[in-house]
Image (cartoon, rainbow, N blue to C red):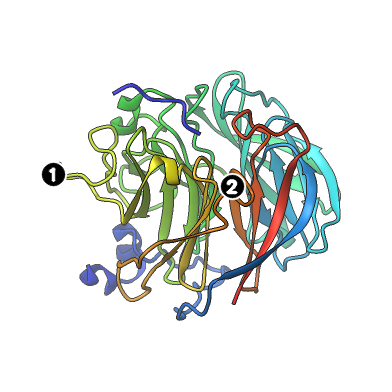
Amino acid sequence: MTPTPRSGLAALALTGAAALLAGLVPTAAAGEPAPPAPAATRGNPGAVATVSNGWTIPWGAAWLPGGSAALVTERNSFKVFSVTPSGTKKEIGTVPESQTTGGEGGLMGIAVDPQWSANRFVYLMHTSSEGNRIARMTYDGSTLGGYRKLVGDIKKARFHNGGALAFGPDGHLYAATGDAQVPALAQDRNSLNGKILRLTRDGRPAPGNPFDSAVFSLGHRNPQGLAFDSRGRLWSAELGQSTRDELNLIKSGHNYGWPSCEGDCQVAGMTNPKRTWGVAEASPSGIAIVDNAVYMASLRGKRLWQIPIDPANENTGTPKAYYTNSYGRLRSVTRTPGKNEFWISTTNTDGNGGQPAGSDRLLRVTVG
C-alpha cells in the first residue's frame, strides 16, 4: 500500500511494575500526583467561545501546572506562545534548528513537566535538518530558552510525522511518531518511527519498557493524539491510510497492526482499535479526556467526536459528533486543569482549509 498525504480484567488486578508492563495503569512516581479516581461521565460539550484569534497553524498546547497559562506551538513559524485563560497572548520564544517539510512537519507537540515549578522544563517535538527530534527547553515564566536535543534518529517526511507529546501519571514522557511514509518502519523494533515512545525526563528509555529501548508500542501509521484517562490508561488517535481511522488503547509491547492492518485486524499478534471511523468523517489529530469521554479533533471531518469510555473495563460507548462544519479543521484538544473544560485549536490555514494566515483560533468548550 502506498501512503497518502492525509492530513482483561485480569490485567487490571496487577499492581506496581507488573501493571505498568501490562500497559494498563501507569503508577505514580515519587513526588508525582496519583491518577484521579474514576468518575461517571456527567455531561456533553456545550457552547463554544473564542479564547484567542490571529493564529496560523497552532499545533500543540499544554498547560502550566495550576492553570495560569497554556503554552501553544505554531507549526510553521516555530514559535511558542503563552495564552492565559482570559486570552492574553504572548510570544515567549522560538524553537531553534526547526524547519518545515512542506507538509505536516515543523514545530508540533509540546508538554510541560509536571514538576515545572521546580525545574522549569518544557518538552517539544519538532522537525530539524536531519529528522524529527524531541527537545527540552527551559521556560522561566517569561522567556523560553536553553535548548537541548534529547532524542534524534526519528525519520521525517513530508507527511506522517506524528508529533504528540504527553506526560503520564508515572512521571515519564510519551511521544507519538509517524512512519515517515515508509510503512515497514512501523514494524521495525530498531526504528523509532511508527511508534509510541516512553522516555525519562532526559530522553532515555524509561525503566520497564518492553523492548529494552525507548519503544513502548509499535505498528502505528501516524498517531497525532495522546491522552491518559482516569485509570491512568493511555489512549491514542491515529490517522489511517484510505479506509479507517483509529482510536487505540495503548498497552506496553502491543503491536497495533500497521501496515498489515488498517482498522480492525485478524492477524495474530496484532491489537485491534477500540473504535474506527471512515477517513472522510475523522482524520483525527489531538485528543483530551474529560469526564470519562475522549474528545477527538477531526481534520478532514471538521468535527469533534465524543467517545465515552468505561473506567471499569475497556469498553467504549457510541461516538457522537459535535460542531460538524462549524469551525473547520480541528487540530488540538487540551483539557483545562481542574475544570470540566477543554480548548480546541483550528487548522484552517494549513493549505487544506482554504483560509489565509492568521485565521485560526483557540476555542473554549465547557462540558456540563
Near mark 2 (Cα within 10 A), the count class, few <14, some 14-19 or many ≥20, is many
Query: Comparing marks 1 and 2, which lies closer to the viewer?
Result: 2
The mark nearer the N terminus, 1 or 2, is 1
Tell me which amino acid carries mark 1. Ala
Question: Which residue is painted at 72% across and 52% down in the image?
Answer: 362
Residue 325 picture location, percent across and down:
57, 49
Most foreground residue, 63 or 96? 63
Residue 51 picture location, percent across and down:
77, 57
Q: Is residue 214 visible?
A: no
* Residue 131 image label: none
Q: Secondary structure at mark 2?
A: strand
Question: Which residue is painted at 42% across and 58% down in the image?
Answer: 234
Q: Up-down: is 114 above or below 217?
A: below
Near mark 1 (Cα within 10 A), the count class, few <14, some 14-19 or many ≥20, is few
Q: Which residue is mark 2?
A: 330
Tell me which amino acid carries mark 2. Leu
Q: Where is the C terminus found, in terms of image quarters?
A: bottom right
Q: Up-down: is 98 above or below 359?
A: above
Residue 136 picture location, percent across and down:
65, 41
Q: Is residue 117 visible?
A: yes
Apparent side of residue 355 relative to residue 173 in the rendered image (left or right): right
Residue 102 picture location, percent across and down:
60, 20
Question: Which residue is painted at 45% across and 46% down in the image?
Answer: 282
> Which corner quadrant of the image does residue 220 belong to?
top left
Q: Up-down: is 39 above or below 177?
A: below
Q: Where is the N terminus found, in terms of image quarters?
A: top left
Question: Which residue is painted at 73% across and 29% down in the image?
Answer: 96
Apparent side of residue 84 relative to residue 148 in the rendered image (left or right): right
Q: Which residue is mark 1?
A: 268
Q: Secondary structure at mark 1?
A: loop
| In contact (CB < 8 Å): disc 1 and disc 2 | no
| Real-space CA distance between mark 1 and mark 2, rounded to the nearest whole angstrom | 35 Å
